Image: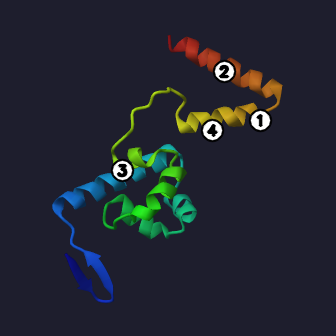
Amino acid sequence: MLMASSSHWITAVTPQDKRFYQALGQRVAELRKAQDLTQVQLAERLGVSQQTLAHYEVGRLRIAVAMLPALAKELAVSVETLVGTPTIRNKRGPAPKLQRQIEQIQQLPRTKQRFVIEMLDTVLQQSD
């Protein structure tokens, strides 16, 4: 069912749709924070305003289906994970943030790499 709203056409939203978009927005906010991104940074990458992203995150606006692949890419997750239907991972690997940090460490000079490894070894030994 379509309803006219001034010059825009919108679809009727069921309570189930509303819960879905609120949960999706909450996942976007959590994943954005896990990537150490601000709303402004993620909004710029997606080509939307910070205010629009804020509305997505609280479920006030619905995220367009066409935006989901780009959003998932920026948040380093699959579309399935983003919408709440995670796929079964056959392969274990580092979290996206950890993977980026490993790649950054690989770019450091060998002396700094050894320093980072020593720090990690110390921290890991203390956690045993």
| Proximity of marks 1 and 2: CB atoms separated by less than 8 Å | no
Mark carried by residue 81? none
Q: Local crowd at mark 4 within 10 Å, few (<14), some, or many (≥20)?
A: few
> Residue 30's x, y, as percent?
41, 47
- What residue would you read off at disc 4? 100
Using residue 28 as the reference point, say whether residue 115 is left or right of it: right
In the image, residue 5 above or below residue 58 = below
- What residue would you read off at disc 2? 119
Kind of residue at badge 3: Val
Q: How far apart are marks 3 and 1 (CA)?
A: 34 Å
- What residue would you read off at disc 3? 83
Nearer the observer: mark 4 or 3; the answer is 3
Q: Local crowd at mark 3 within 10 Å, few (<14), some, or many (≥20)?
A: some
In the image, residue 100 above or below residue 9 = above
Q: Is mark 3 on a helix, strand or loop?
A: helix
Q: What element carries label 4?
A: helix
Q: What element carries label 2?
A: helix
Kind of residue at badge 2: Met
Q: Give the image quarter of residue 85.
A: top left
> Residue 7's x, y, as percent?
33, 89
Which color scheme does this rendered protein use? Answer: rainbow
- Of the image marks 1 and 2, the number of the one nearer the N terminus: 1
- What residue would you read off at disc 1? 107
Q: Which of the two residues, 43 or 18, is positioned nearer the viewer here?
A: 18
Q: Distance between the residues labelled 4 and 3?
A: 23 Å
| Proximity of marks 2 and 4: CB atoms separated by less than 8 Å | no
Q: Residue at x 46, y 45 (%)?
A: 78
